[in-house]
Image: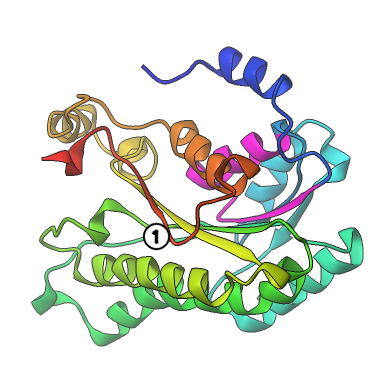
Amino acid sequence: MPVSAETEVAGQAQCRRFEGRVALVTGAASGIGAATARRLAGEGASVVLADRDHDGAEDVRAGLPDRETHIAAKLDVTREAEWTAVLESVSARYGRLDVLVNNAGWSRSAAIADTSLEDWREIVAVHLEAMFVGIRHSLPLLAVSGKGAVVNVSSIRSYVASPGAAAYSAAKSGITMLTKVAALEWADEASRVRFNSVHPGFVRTGLGKDAPPEQVERLAATVPFRRLAAPEEVASAIAFLASDDASYMTGSELVVDGGVTAG
């Protein structure tokens, strides 16, 4: 079963891996992004909670420990000007950026024959293109951190095809290779930034949150663990990759799927 909230908080109290560091998390108003913001803040980070749902991000921020050290920022990841504005505010407020978690995204299911070019471009833009823009504009701050780390949230759909997920799967596959190329380009010791990707399976958010119980049960039955992941379990993997515990990892893929892709 997922780690209880009490156990998670107790563990964080003894584990301050991000003390003195600044982390920017996109899609931080809900789901994996919110869980990641809570996890990083619980381990000592100052967190920039970026989301196009600013009120939602602010609600999450208000519940964080030492909430005045964190900020909520309005960010539509598909808009380059908003990335620039958010990063300027990060530089002005903190003077540094140590961790970038590219998590924002959404999807819709449609067969290729029923997917318009506009829909295709929209899904690819919010996942793959937005990630490229965010990385590109964050690098000047990350490169001077000395411990810069980027974690890109991909999906098991980058490995396992599913009818109706052409645009989503293509974008997530692209994230995997974008991560690897960036890892090689920024491996030099003088300005090293580590890049890794996390590949969640079925998570108890989005579909798992809104679908009828019987639909969730059918989905869980396809998982060897016979349940969906909690967002906090994915957040734990993200925190690991962003921390010094993963200091010799770059260009790596960490799958968090309860065994779905094992066989």
On whether residue 28 falls in the magenta region, the answer is: yes
Q: Position of residue 152 (x, y in %)?
A: 48, 59
Kindly indicate the quadrant of the structure image that contains residue 163: bottom left
Q: Where is residue 15 in the image (x, y as percent from the top left)?
A: 69, 26
Residue that protrudes farthest toward the front in the picture: 189
Give the residue drawn at x 9%, y 78%.
113
Q: Position of residue 162 (x, y in %)?
A: 13, 58
Kindly indicate the quadrant of the structure image that contains residue 14: top right
**Amino acid carrying mark 1 in the image:** Trp
Q: Give the range drawn in magenta.
A: 21-41
Specify whether residue 45 is in view.
yes
Give the residue drawn at x 37%, y 45%.
206
56 on left or right of 105? right
Mark 1 crowd level (few <14, some 14–19, many ≥20, 10 Å Cα): few
Q: Position of residue 171 (x, y in %)?
A: 32, 71
To which residue does mark 1 refer? 106
